[in-house]
Image (spheres, rainbow, N blue to C red):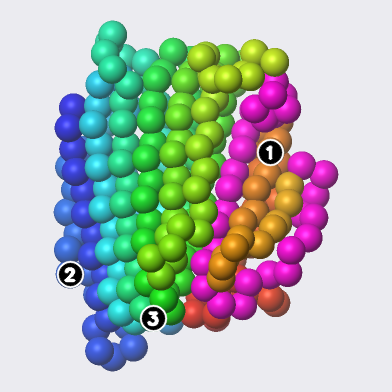
Amino acid sequence: MRAEARVVAEADGRGGTRLAVLRGESPLLLRRTGPLVDGWVTVHLVGGAAGPLRGDELRLDIEVGPGARLEMLSVAASLALPGRPAPPSVLTVTASVATGGVLRWLPEPLIAAAGCDHVVVTRVDVADGGSLLWRDDLVCGRHEETSGAVLADTMIRYAGVTLYRHELAVGPGAPGWDGAAVLGGGRAVGTLVAVGADLPRPGIAGPDAAVMPLAGPGMLATAVGDDIRAVAAALGPLCRRSRPVPLLTPASG
């Protein structure tokens, strides 16, 4: 299966945000949800079919214009499945954030079902003066199930310079996987990258989590746990729009 989805958010000139483009194909269906609040527009990704399955080629493009504020969520976790004998399924996510724009990417976790072979390629470009909150969570297998194979390749650039580049491989064939060298025996991992102003101070977020600065106006928080609840407990407080020390000034409120 091949499918593409695209969302373009623009400032409406009245302090709010409008969706200039919102289109998708199953299983990448996009739906605007909720009223406009504090200038934010919210879009949910809806799974219109099972998968991704082996052989699927999926693409999601996100564009946030100057002064626009977009929050991207999903209605449920994404489940990577084995499917028929075929090359790996591939999801390519690209995003761009213009000066004064803000993007919050906070989907539900990706679950690597046993036997899956899935690749996620993420490329994000944030202009000077733009802000970003980008979260990715991964669960290695369903309940009492071995993990499938997932390769996640992420690059985030700010003002034309690479700020964050990370590659994570789990499941059969991943270097060190059998020896628990990848996640130290954990079955869930989450990362949160914040780009912009008013970032939290570096520090230890918990026994299996940490917050650290990036080489630029950015911060990385990462957490590993026996299940996704431990990851959510560590990273969830950093994703709230209203908090005493905001990650991103435009998102507080």
Which residue in the protein does label 3 denote? 100
Q: Which amino acid lies under the numbered mark 3 shown in the image of this protein? A: Gly
Is 104 located above or below residue 39 in the figure? Answer: above
Which residue in the protein does label 1 denote? 224
Q: Nearer the viewer, residue 238 or 166?
A: 166
Q: Which residues are magenta?
A: 180-208
Residue for point 49% across, 80% down: 250
Does the CB distance between marks 2 and 3 fall below 8 Å? no
Sequence-wise, the earlier of marks 3 and 1 is 3
Sequence-wise, the earlier of marks 2 and 1 is 2
Residue for point 21% across, 48% down: 5
Q: Residues within 10 Å of mark 1 (few under 14, many from 20)?
A: many
Is 37 located above or below residue 95 in the figure? Answer: below
The location of residue 224, given as percent across then percent down, is: 68, 38
Which residue in the protein does label 2 denote? 20
Q: Is residue 101 visible?
A: no
In the picture, which quadrant includes the C terminus? bottom right
- Could you say whether the residue bearing mark 3 is in a helix, strand or loop? loop
Residues under labels 3 and 1: Cα distance? 33 Å
Q: Which amino acid lies under the numbered mark 1 shown in the image of this protein? A: Val
Q: Residues within 10 Å of mark 3 (few under 14, many from 20)?
A: many
Is 144 located above or below residue 42 in the figure? Answer: above
Mark 2 vs mark 1, foreground winner is: 1
Q: Nearer the viewer, residue 176 or 229?
A: 176
Q: Which amino acid lies under the numbered mark 2 shown in the image of this protein? A: Ala
The location of residue 23, given as percent across then percent down, is: 17, 54
Q: Is residue 192 magenta?
A: yes
**28 lies left or right of 184:** left
Residue for point 24% across, 83% down: 12
